[in-house]
Image (cartoon, coloured by chain):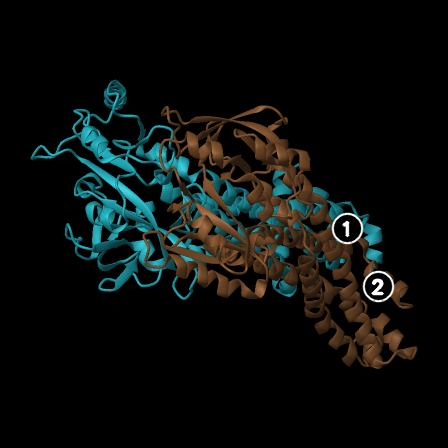
Amino acid sequence: MRYLPLLWAGLFRRKTRTILTLLSIVVAFLLFGMLQAVQTAFESGADAADAKRLLTTARYSIIEPLPMAHLKVIERVPGVVGVASADWFGAKYQNESNAFPVFAVDPARYLDMYPEFTIDPAQREAFAKTRTGAVAGQRLVDRYGWRIGQKLPIASEIHAKTDGSLNWEFDLVGVIDAEDPAIRGNTDVVLINVAHFDEARQLGRGKTGWYVERIAESEQAKAISSEIDRLFANSPDETKTAPEKEFAVGFAKQIGDIGAVVTRILIAVFFTILILTGNTMAQSIRERIPELAILKTLGFSDARVTALVVAEAVLLLALGGGLGMAAAAALLPAVNGSTGGRFPPLFVTETTWLAAAGLALLVALAIGLPPALRARRLRIVDALAGR
Amino acid sequence: MRHPVRALAQIAQITLINLRSLPQRLGTSLVVVVGIAGVVGVLVSVLAMGEGFRHTLASTGRPGRVIMLRAGSDAELSSGVDRDQTTLLAALPAIARDGSGRPLASAELVVMVDLPRKGESHPNNVPFRGVQPGAFAIRDELRLVEGRAFRRGVREVIVGRKAAQQFAGLDVGSRIAFRDSDWTVVGTFATGGDVHESEIWADAEVAMSAFRRTGYQSMTATLADGSQAGLAALTAAIRRDPRLSINVLREPEYYAKQAGVLARLITVLGYTVAAFMAIGATFGALNCMYSAIASRQVEIATLRAIGFGGAPVVVSVMIEALLLALVGGAAGGALAYVYCDGASLSTLNFSTFSQVAFDFRVTPALLGQGLAWALLIGAAGGLLPAIRAARLPVTTALRAV
C-alpha cells in the first residue's frame, strides 16, 4: 500500500496518455458487462429455475396438447406435492403477435407452483374467484399503463370463442412481481383463469398445454420424472417430464450460435485492447528506464522493481475495469427502460463481476509482464548511460 | 496561405517525410492499424450476420404467391385450415392452374420435430413441413441437390440444405425417427438460401397421419394474376364465402413479418457493439498518434523553423492517420470476409418458435461502411495530435532535446 503514491505518480506521469488508455479499457469492460448481461438474460431461465419444479409436456412436441385428466393422475404420484396445468393462449395485443405470453391456468394451483412470485393476498383471492379474471406481471403493467380493475382486450391467434370470435376480454384483478431481477423476467406474462377460458373456447376443450409439478425433494427429480412418464407410456398422450432447469437450458441452447457470436465479439474486443494498451505500457516503461535505474541505485531489488511495474499495470486495469463495469451496471437500468420490457431484464450479476476481475488480472499480467521483465534485467550502469 | 501551390508542395513534402519514417515507427503504426482492423472486423462481421438473416427472410417467397392462414393468425404455427376449406380455396378462379388444369396450390402442415445440432445432444425445434404435390410446381426455385424427391404415400423426406448442415442425422440414406414413425431421408434440396432450407419436407398426407393431425395449417398458392387486382379478386372471393374465414398475405409480406424481432435484435446488437468498440479504438488511435507526434517533436519543430507552415504540418499528420486507418479498415474488412462470409449459423426465431439457419453475408456495402468507420476513427484520432504538433511553439519544442 505504501507504494501506491509511487505507482500513481508513475501512471499519471503523462496524463493524456494514461487517461486515453484508461478510457479504452473502460469501454472494453463496459462492453463486457453489457454483453455478459445479454448472455445472462438468455440463460437466466436456467438460473431462476427451481430444482423442486418439474415440467411435463407432450412427448414429441411442446406444442401438442395434453388431456386435463392427466392432472389427477400426476397428483397421485408419490413425492409430488402439487401440480398445475397451463395452456398457451397465443396472444395478440394491439395487433402485435406474441406481444407477451398469456397462459390459461388454475389460479390457486398455478401460483402455488411459483412461491417466488409476489402477489397481494386480496388480489390472489380475487383472481381465484373471478372467472374472467387475469393477473399480469408488473413490467407489463408498466409498459402498457394498465390499471387494476380495467378490461384487457386480448385477441388469440389460436383459440376462437364459441361464437367464432378471436377477440377475448379479461378483467385485470392483480399484479405479480418478483424481488430477484433474474426471476422478474419470468413474470412478463398474463395469467388468465382456465375455468372461463376452457368453457368459452370453441375447440380443444379439456386439453391443456403442459403441467408444472412441485416435488418434496429435489434429489427425487429424476425418479419422479420417469415415474410420471411411465404412467402415460404407450397411451395416445405420452409425456416428457424434466426438471424446469433442463427446459430452460434447452431453450438457451436453442438460441445457440448467437451466444457463440457474442463470445467471439468479446474476444476480438479484448485482443484489440490488449494490443493498444500493451503498446502504451511498453512505451511508458521505455521512457522511464533512467528512473527505474535510479530506483535500483537506491536499493530496490530486481524483484521489487518488477513487482512495481506489474502493479502499475494491475492498477491501470483495476481502475479501468472497475469504472467500466460500474458504468455497465449504471447504464443497464436505462437500457431496460428503453426496451419497454420487451426483452428480459438485463443486469450485472456477481459472476460477471468476478469474471471481469479475473479478466482484468489476466490482461494486466499480459501487458505488465513483458516490460516488467525488461525492467528486471536492467543493469544500472547501462540504463543510466542511456545504452 | 499566400501561395496555395507552395502550401500543397509543403504538404506533399512533409507527408513524404512522414511516410518514409514510418518503418522506424513500425510498432506504434502497427498498433493503430491493428486497433482499427479489430473494430472494422467486428463491425463488418456482426452486421454481416444481420444482413444474412434479412437476406434469408427477404429472399423467401415471390410477390406472385400468397400464403393463406386462418383469419387472426400471423404465423403458420398458430393457424389452422381444415381439409374442406383447402378444397374450396384451391378451386377459386383467382388461383393459377398448371398445363393440365390442376390448381397451383399446396395445403401444408408444419410440425416441430426435435433434432440435436451436430455434435450436441440438446433437441432443437426444426420445422417439418408436409406438402402437397403442387408445392414443387409453385416453388420453382426449389432444386434437388442430392438424391431424389420423396414418393407419395411413403414415409420419405427431403431435407433443406441448411438443415442438413446444422442438424445431426440428416444425410441422404439415413433414417430418422419422429413420434412412432421412421422416415428415410431420400434427398437434399436448395431453395436459393431462403427459410425453407432450414426445413424438412414430406408428403402432406403421410405427415398428417404420422403426426395425428386432422387439418392443415396454411395453403400456399400462385396467383392467376400477380397484380394488386389479382390479389383483390382472391380476397373478395374468400370474403364472399361464409365457409372461409381466411387471411391472405403475399409471401414476401408474410416472411418480412416473421423476421421482425430477431432482425431488430441482431441489428441493435451489431451497432451497439460497433459504436462502443469504435469509441475505444478512437482513444487508442489518439494515444498512438499522440506518441508518434511526441517522438517526432524535434523533427516537426525543425521543419517549422526552416519555413514550413503550421497548416501543412496538420494536414500531413492527418493524411498519415487516415492512411493508417485505411490500411486497418481494409485489413479488418478482409479478415471479416475471409472468416465470416458464407459461414452459416442457426438460431431460434422467436416469432415462429423454430430454428432458422442463415449465412453471414459480407456485402460490398458493408465493406464500404467498414472503411468509412475506419476513416472516421482515423480522422478523430489524428486531428487533435496534429493540431497540437502545429501549435507547439518552435522554441519550446526544440529545447525538449
Residue at horizontal 19%, vertical 28%? B88
Chain identifier of the residue bearing label 1 in the image? B
Mark yes or no: residue B204 visible: yes
Task: Report the amino acid beneath label 1.
Answer: Ala
Identify the secondary structure beneath mark 1: helix
Chain painted cyan: B
Chain painted brown: A
Mark yes or no: residue B367 visible: no
How far apart are the two marked residues, 1 and 2, measured between alpha carbons? 33 Å
Q: Specify few, some or many for label 1: CA neighbours under 10 Å numbering under 14, 14-19, or 20 or more.
A: few
Horizontal side, residue A157 vs residue B103: left or right: right
Residue closer to the observer: A305 or A167? A167
Q: Specify few, some or many for label 2: CA neighbours under 10 Å numbering under 14, 14-19, or 20 or more.
A: some
For the N terminus of chain A, which image quadrant?
A: bottom right
Chain identifier of the residue bearing label 2 in the image? A
Horizontal side, residue B197 vs residue B87: left or right: right
Residue closer to the observer: A125 or B77? A125
- The residue carrying mark 1 is B305
Give residue B383's position: percent from left, percent from top.
68, 45
Residue closer to the observer: A313 or B216? B216
Horizontal side, residue B82 vs residue A292: left or right: left
Identify the secondary structure beneath mark 2: helix
Give residue A320's position: percent from left, percent from top.
74, 56
Give residue B55's position: percent from left, percent from top.
38, 43
- The residue carrying mark 2 is A10
Give residue B275's position: percent from left, percent from top.
60, 45
